[in-house]
Amino acid sequence: MLDQKIKTSFNVEQIRKEFPTLSQQVYGKDLIYLDNGATSQKPQSVIDAIAKYYTKDNSNIHRGVHHLSQVATEQYENARETIQKYINAPLLEEVLFTVGTTAGINMIAFSFGETLIEGDEIIISAMEHHSNIVPWQMLCERKKCILKIIPINNAGELKMDVYDSLLSKQTKLVAITHISNTLGTINPIREIIQKAHKAGAKVLIDGAQSIQHMKIDVQKLDCDFFVFSGHKVFGPTGVGIVYGKKEVLENLPPYQGGGDMIAKVTFDKTTYNVLPHKFEAGTPNISGGICLGTAFEFLSQQDMNAISEHENELASYAEKEILKIEGAKIIGTARNKTSVVSFIIDDLHPFDVGTLLDKQGIAVRTGHHCTQPLMDFFEIPGTIRASFAFYNTMEEVELFLKALKRSVGMLR
Amino acid sequence: MTLEEKQIEITEEFEVFDDWMDKYEYIIELGKELPIISEENKTESKLIEGCQSRVWLNSELKEGRMQFTADSDAIITKGIIGLLIRVLNNETPETIATSDLHFIADIGLQEHLSPRRANGLASMVQKMKLSALKSI
């Protein structure tokens, strides 16, 4: 019944045809891929673009005088433009290619960190991924800065009143996840950004879990940095984006030194290249960048509202049914949530449940999801996480629930 | 029974299962039966911290033969530990240190013991062999 309702507004079967990875069997069972929070599958257009690049266009970019170098440069810079338009960045040079979210945050933690002095404060939250915790801890150790944490309530929502009280003129940066990878909580980042700016602080948004679920407009958000990984948004691994406001980026020192990021090198003094190249030392992941552009071309043809409606329908149905299992508890019950369903079942170990689901062809994630402080808060060793993408179907959710009930029965 | 004979015996036991779920049903049963480590040995120092499940291991040398007891908070892990202990218990340190535990791959459970994946069990086998080595 639910399936029919979805088909009228959104054709999931049509979408699935674009993703060849989904049509295969594991352990003799049809693969049901519910680990989209970890990485997404790739549409055929992205896979073809990778093959085309290495078959026809492979060359180093920016400095070559020859034909192939010009072709590769053109495609790489076109990809930057596609991504710029998609996230509505005002300027092309504000879109920096990097390796992924982790590398992007480390880059900002270093370069922005260089502008900080002892006693400056950085605010993060209790629901951050380790990659938005550890780089700041390293920076605080290096520069003797202070890291402050916005706590969460039992539903997994930020305590915004505490956030207000943490902000002060010492606050230099607020680094916050848009969507929690473990809980699915969608944070009120517009409010967070406005309040931080009022206090004179810059804001970095970790968009690793949001860009694939909703339309991102960096101008509307008014964030100073927006960072995400290519592989979670239907693109290749090893490539990601740091969006940064030009006036902020221009005042930061470069992160890595090397080729491409320089204007002139002498042994006495080296001057740096303009944006974006100042932050793009060395030969980049050229094919990754080009094919991330392809992924965004694919994404810009999709109706993001229909996608998020479909994903939420799957997740809320799954949540409702999981709760019917004796001893089941959903971890992360924020009012504003994306299609991530994290749960535990009594004293059953997530690893056991995940292993049995795997043998029935179902890919979920189990463990602490790189958010150990969050696990400590909920006093659990880990969760079982099913994270849905737009290519998942209600039929898959039903099969997942059936397999889950069978697994629980075996373990009890 | 030699270590090799024990490995063959386990492989034969698993041959009757043609379905993955039946195989795991059996491992879960083994996990439930595992004589667990005594509470006083369930300490931090006996803990092998893995990415997915926690494993405690105690090894002792008694009359020239190794004795292992272990526990885990995950029952599948306990089942696999049970198999490892069945193969390695009462063997001499030399036999254990030089053993090739091929039965794990033979019964299709190598994914749990691959050092390429973050998993407590690979370190457990390493620790069992290491404690045997130390006892030589």
Image: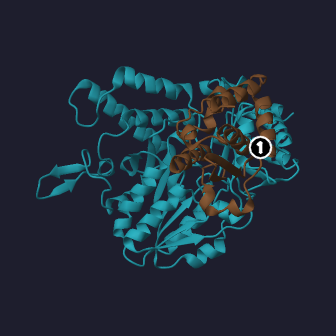
Q: Quadrant of residue B41?
A: bottom right
Tally the marks.
1
User: Is residue B118 in sight in this rendering?
Assistant: no
x, y percentage for residue A185?
Answer: 67, 56
Three-letter amino acid code at the position of disc 1: Gly
Q: Is residue A176 left or right of residue A358?
A: left
Q: Quadrant of residue A129?
A: bottom right
Say which quadrant the N terminus of chain A sits in.
top right
Q: Is residue A260 left or right of residue B80?
A: left
At x 63%, y 46%, the residue is B66
In-front residue for pair A87/B105: B105
Vertical relation: B67 (above or below) A47: below
x, y percentage for residue A61?
Answer: 29, 35
x, y percentage for residue B50?
Answer: 60, 50
At x 79%, y 22%, the residue is B16
Vertical relation: A202 (above or below) A15: below
Q: Report which residue position mark 1 lands on.
A: B31
Q: Which chain appears cyan?
A: A
At x 33%, y 30%, the residue is A72
x, y percentage for residue A66?
Answer: 22, 26
Q: Which chain appears brown?
A: B
Say which quadrant the C terminus of chain A sits in.
top right
Q: Quadrant of residue A152?
A: bottom right
Q: Is residue A158 left or right of residue A400?
A: left
At x 30%, y 57%, the residue is A254
In-front residue for pair A162/A139: A139
